[in-house]
Image (cartoon, rainbow, N blue to C red):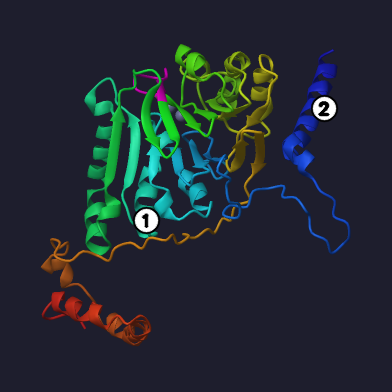
Amino acid sequence: MSSHLGTFRLLCRIVFSALLVLPAAVLAAGGVVKDPAGVAPDRYVYYPGTEALNKKEIRITACGTGMPAARHAQAATCFLVEFGNGEKHIYDIGTGSMANLAAYMIPMEYLDKIFLTHLHTDHMGDIDTIWAGGWTAGRPVGLKVWGPAGLHPELGTKAAMEGFLDFVAWDKETRSFQITPAPGEIEVHEFDYKIENQLVYENNGIEVRSIPAIHTGDGPVSYILRYEGMKVVVGGDTAPNRWFQKYAKDADLIIHESFMVPNDFVQWYNQPPQLAWRACCAFHTSGQAFGKIMSELEPGHAVAYHFLNEEATRYNLYEAIRETYDGPLSMATDNMVWNITPDGIEERMAAITHEAWSVPGPTRQSPPETGRRPVFSDFTNSGYWLPAYEAQNDAMDQHMEKYNLQDVDWRPGMMKMMSKDPVR
Ligand SMILES: [Zn+2]
Ligand SMILES: [Zn+2]
């Protein structure tokens, strides 16, 4: 009996595995290659930077779907939402997610709006990377961060971002001196997490509202996005809660966390069993609970995330979800893409390069400011070793001539800053 059950489960897994590789939308999109030199007429994957959005379209890319212990296959939580009007929002920027974001071929100046669901590092851990990485890669402006207050002032988004800027004081000061200061600023929009269906952002036909969530402490929220008659819900970490049931109805797409089954936390994530069943099922949402929520809300498409998505674990969670939900479902992993239009939802995977570089945008960063307080002492200035500087002089001269930099040649000023008696 049990071996029959085992064989059946194995067969299910093989079939499900095949379906994961070829989801329904992709099967339907397939075209015929009519001769050996022909090209495939339809795209099976999304190539970042190659598809313009229609006005009535939203594209969401999962830039992070995993756990706090980020890994190559899955960064921690991050969803990039691109609207047909050109606006782009980042919902959470968990640890490791910037490497994915960077591969979507978007100029940094368009990646300046971040909405945080809560202040766990797996939802904001790469704030440093987008802050400094965007700054050095040409972002001309500072970041704007929306996020909830906490039960106490020091536990809110404003305090977190101020604390972050304290933490990076040396980075900020020295970068401001060498580059240009404006992109190092962070504009914080903190809001009360307790207000239901609160308008936290409105611009150019986009409306973002927050609803409270329940997760390890006061503060967390989920976001409800409306654009061109479409509704998308970006759920942050939460236990099943009544606000979600009340306000996430009639959505085209709902993104909601769904935690691995408790035993997988014990077996694969090194958690004691006492923590495992609380982690999945008390302050997060289990597969069965996720399914129950979706059965009730009946979204056009449901997206489960926040689990290790691999052979050892995905089927257990999938089966748990399917105990209570049989509607459209994505088991999210990094770089999964959803295109949402009034006509429906298409799920694909993005084909990303691992060697992405920064894509230039229309706005150039300002040149470095002059007159800032020095960041070098006489002690450090006495340490330069001149022969190496002299060795690069010819190359510097060539660069100066190519770009007409004669007026801003840094070398005479630097020589002046150096010790009167430099080491030779
Ligand atoms: Zn959390
Ligand atoms: Zn989390």
Residue 191 inside the magenta-drawn segment: no
Q: Quadrant of residue 373?
A: bottom left
Residue 11 numbered tag: 2
Vertical placement of residue 284 versus 381, above or below: above
Which residue, given by chain and number where applicable, does mark 1 sit on? 139
Residue 340 drawn at (x, y percent): 60, 36
Residue at horizontal 81 percent and vertical 15 percent from the top: 2
Residue 286 drawn at (x, y percent): 56, 18
What kind of residue is marked 2?
Leu
As rendered, which of 128 and 275 lies closer to the eye? Answer: 128
Mark 2 to mark 1 CA distance (whole Å): 50 Å
Looking at the image, residue 34 sits to the left or right of residue 207; the answer is right
Residue at horizontal 40 percent and vertical 53 percent from the top: 109
Which residue lies most toward the bottom here?
Answer: 394
Residue 265 numbered tag: none
Vertical placement of residue 60 versus 177, above or below: above
